[in-house]
Image (spheres, helix red, strand yellow):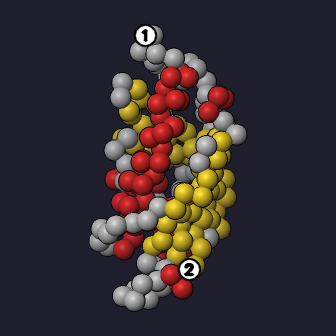
């Protein structure tokens, strides 16, 4: 299993941050590769989200289910189709890291644990002469750049204005 663990600081309390983390419908605004989010449920535990992704000549719909919510601390999820993957968004108070112009701060963690070799080879329609292993090899290095974009845009929404955001990489495959 591979693991990605990233974090960044938002200059807001966990109570202010958590609704943004939980709002999967807004995620297409944070990344260029997530085209659409459809939800089946009320956003709580058991809700299923279809996340339509597109990159290069590929498109794929990941189906994610919310498995646990402990607001405003964490939201756990798992993919329910085609690949063995699960993860969590965590929000922890970190007031000591707040800059002088902010009242408080919270650290936002994103964790994903996945087996890239568990992917269903029939789930993605690949161009001729392109293997799933090649796609995995090309996508993995792009994950960090994509994570940085998502975090920067998420923090801009939370704080109401864009700023340079430091992404801390705790673990990458």
Which residue occupies the foreground of this view, 155 or 77?
155
Identify the residue shown where x is 60% and y is 65%.
90
Image disc number at residue 42: none
Look at the picture and state if 117 lies above or below 26: above
Residue 55 at what x, y percent from top left?
38, 33
Q: Is residue 66 visible?
A: no
Residue 77 at what x, y percent from top left?
62, 51
* Residue topped by disc 2: 94
Q: Is residue 173 visible?
A: yes
Identify the residue shown where x is 57% and y is 44%.
64
Residue 78 at what x, y percent from top left?
64, 46
- Confirm or deny contact between disc 1 and disc 2 (CB under 8 A): no
SS of the residue under disc 2: loop
Image disc number at residue 128: 1
Identify the residue shown where x is 39% and y is 70%.
158
Classify mark 1: residues with Cα within 10 Å, few (<14), some (14-19) or many (20+). few
């Amino acid at each position: 299993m591979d693991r990605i663990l990233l974090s960044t600081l938002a200059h807001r309390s966990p109570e202010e941050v958590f609704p943004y983390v939980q709002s999967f419908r807004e995620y297409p605004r944070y990344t260029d590769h997530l085209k659409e989010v459809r939800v089946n449920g009320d956003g709580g535990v058991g809700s299923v989200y279809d996340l339509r992704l597109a990159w290069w000549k590929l498109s794929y719909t990941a189906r994610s289910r919310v498995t646990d919510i402990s607001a405003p601390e964490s939201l756990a999820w798992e993919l329910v189709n085609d690949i063995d993957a699960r993860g969590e968004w965590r929000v922890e108070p970190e007031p000591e890291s707040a800059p002088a112009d902010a009242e408080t701060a919270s650290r936002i963690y994103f964790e994903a644990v996945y087996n890239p070799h568990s992917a269903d080879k029939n789930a993605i329609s690949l161009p001729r002469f392109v293997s799933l292993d090649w796609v995995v090899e090309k996508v993995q290095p792009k994950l960090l750049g994509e994570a940085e974009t998502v975090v920067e845009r998420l923090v801009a929404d939370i704080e109401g204005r864009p700023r340079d955001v430091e992404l801390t990489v705790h673990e990458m495959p």
